[in-house]
Image (tube, coloured by chain):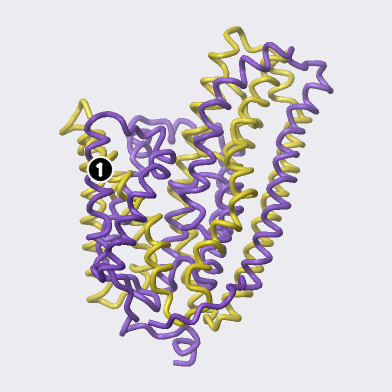
Chain colours: A yellow, B purple
């Protein structure tokens, strides 16, 4: 009964319709933003560099999401994890929410339990959906309003940077004091990024600047294999 | 520094993305809810109220506040592409670095109309590719599973966030490449950073609640920066090396 629901053709169809909608939504943003960038005077070549770099960078984190998909399919079969990992939340959220809902249900997964889990995982994302709907515009324009149309952004620019600063002040201590492996990977990737930046600057290899983030990510992640051997408990 | 404050009007792209983004977010949420409801109706598998409450309570109590906190914390960085970012998910490990990297490459400032357009372009391209890669993962699940589930690959993928933050950390020490540069931003970060370290060492700040702690530390960072901005320890200067995009285009 549960397998019949979780692996049904209907669920596949509903998921594929939703994914087409997500692709259309993303494409609408892409088209509009590309056009606006061109209006700002950015060359096609410069925009292609940005797009290429974004796409190259996306591959590795997306593979990590595919690994999350394999984990979730053990409980939810294929279509539901496919849908969940393509919209809202993150791999971490879906894994935790799925596990938490299964434990809360406290019994074998049957058809009605599966539907309850789907509803729970969807309702759990309400904060990420309604947050931007309610405060998205206010937060963006509220910060920009600080200096109005002033020619020098002044305080608004500092204020805008405080969000990124705060994020660093939360994440860096969590990574540094969290585990020795995380700290080592953090510093390794910092050094790799610096070295790649220097090489790109000296050689004027533009492709290396574009791929700096992607290469740093891959090499940083690979360094974890070394660090987990040195700090086995980390 | 000019003090001529006028009413701020949003760029047409920003105006469009707020309107379109809001409508689509609500429509997609309704569709997301519709999927389990349709499945329940077609397969006569509607859960009882008590089962639904039990399954939902833990997830909703924990994750809805986290979602709201993350929205407030990350929206000013993502700008008008916040809708796209949150709807397609994976903010910290994908969308945020993608947006930052794109703004850095295009040499535009975060929070400006140019920065918003560039970030949206990068995030939308990234979102489309992610949807395609996951779809390929589903299609190739049989041949891919043995490769992607070997221990070395699984270990490496556990360290996406620290590997990304290495680049961010370096970027944090570098000067902005856009039209304006902030001088003395490390001074403004000192107190919140120390506070972050203390809270982590005391095991008060934990990874699962990072969004909440960003929200809690934010007033401290704003206050420190505001005081230092008033004292001119933190200043904003025009970037001497900045070349406007249309001039670069003309070269």
Q: Which quadrant is home to the N terminus of chain B? A: bottom left
Percent x, y of residue B121: 56, 65
In the rendered image, the vertical position of residue A224 relative to residue B150, given as above or below: below
Depth check: give the residue in front, B53 or A156: A156
Mark 1, secondary structure of its residue: helix
Percent x, y of residue A73: 57, 26
Which residue reaches farthest bottom? Answer: B251
The reply, left or right, for residue A9 in relation to residue A69 is right
Residue at 26%, 71% (x, y): give it.
B232
Residue at 29%, 39% (x, y): give it.
A174
Percent x, y of residue A40: 56, 80
**Residue topped by disc 1:** B195
Residue at 21%, 49% (x, y): give it.
A187
In the rendered image, the vertical position of residue A78 relative to residue A41, given as above or below: above
Q: Which quarter of the picture shows residue A206?
A: bottom left
Q: Which quarter of the picture shows residue B3?
A: bottom left
């Amino acid at each position: 009964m549960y397998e019949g629901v979780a692996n049904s053709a209907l669920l596949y169809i509903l998921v594929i319709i939703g994914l087409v909608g997500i692709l259309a939504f993303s494409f609408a943003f892409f088209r509009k933003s590309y056009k606006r960038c061109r209006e700002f005077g950015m060359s096609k070549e410069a925009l292609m560099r940005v797009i290429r770099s974004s796409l190259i960078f996306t591959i590795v984190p997306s593979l990590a999401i595919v690994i999350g998909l394999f984990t979730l399919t053990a409980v939810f079969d294929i279509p539901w994890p496919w849908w969940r990992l393509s919209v809202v939340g993150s791999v971490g959220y879906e894994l935790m929410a799925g596990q938490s809902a299964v434990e809360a249900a406290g019994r074998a997964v049957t058809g009605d339990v599966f539907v309850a889990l789907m509803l729970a995982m969807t309702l759990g994302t309400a904060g990420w959906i309604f947050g931007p709907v309610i405060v998205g515009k206010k937060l963006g324009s509220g910060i920009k309003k600080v200096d109005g149309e002033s020619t020098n952004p002044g305080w608004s620019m500092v204020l805008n940077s405080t969000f990124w600063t705060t994020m660093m002040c939360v994440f860096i201590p969590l990574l540094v004091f969290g585990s020795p492996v995380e700290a080592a990977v953090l510093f390794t990737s910092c050094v790799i990024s610096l070295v790649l930046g220097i090489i790109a600057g000296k050689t004027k290899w533009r492709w290396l600047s574009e791929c700096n983030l992607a290469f740093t990510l891959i090499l940083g992640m690979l360094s974890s294999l070394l660090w987990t051997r040195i700090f086995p408990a980390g | 520094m000019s003090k001529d404050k006028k009413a701020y009007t949003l760029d047409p792209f920003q105006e469009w993305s707020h309107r379109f983004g809001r409508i689509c977010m609500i429509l997609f949420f309704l569709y997301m809810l519709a999927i389990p409801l349709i499945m329940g109706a077609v397969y006569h598998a509607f859960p009882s109220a008590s089962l639904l409450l039990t399954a939902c309570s833990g997830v909703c109590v924990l994750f809805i506040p986290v979602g709201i906190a993350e929205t407030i914390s990350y929206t000013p960085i993502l700008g008008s592409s916040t809708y796209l970012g949150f709807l397609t998910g994976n903010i910290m490990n994908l969308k945020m670095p993608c947006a930052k990297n794109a703004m850095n490459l295009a040499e535009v400032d975060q929070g400006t109309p140019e920065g918003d357009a560039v970030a949206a372009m990068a995030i939308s391209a990234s979102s489309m590719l992610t949807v395609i890669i996951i779809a390929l993962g589903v299609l190739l699940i049989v041949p891919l599973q043995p490769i992607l589930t070997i221990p070395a690959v699984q270990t490496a993928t556990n360290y996406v966030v620290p590997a990304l933050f290495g680049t961010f950390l370096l970027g944090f020490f570098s000067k902005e490449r856009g039209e304006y540069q902030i001088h003395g931003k490390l001074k403004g970060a000192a107190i919140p950073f120390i506070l972050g370290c203390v809270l982590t060492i005391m095991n008060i700040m934990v990874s699962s609640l990072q969004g909440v702690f960003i929200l809690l530390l934010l007033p401290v960072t704003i206050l420190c920066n505001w005081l230092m901005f008033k004292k001119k320890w933190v200043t904003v200067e025009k970037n001497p090396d900045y070349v406007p995009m249309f001039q670069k285009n003309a070269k």
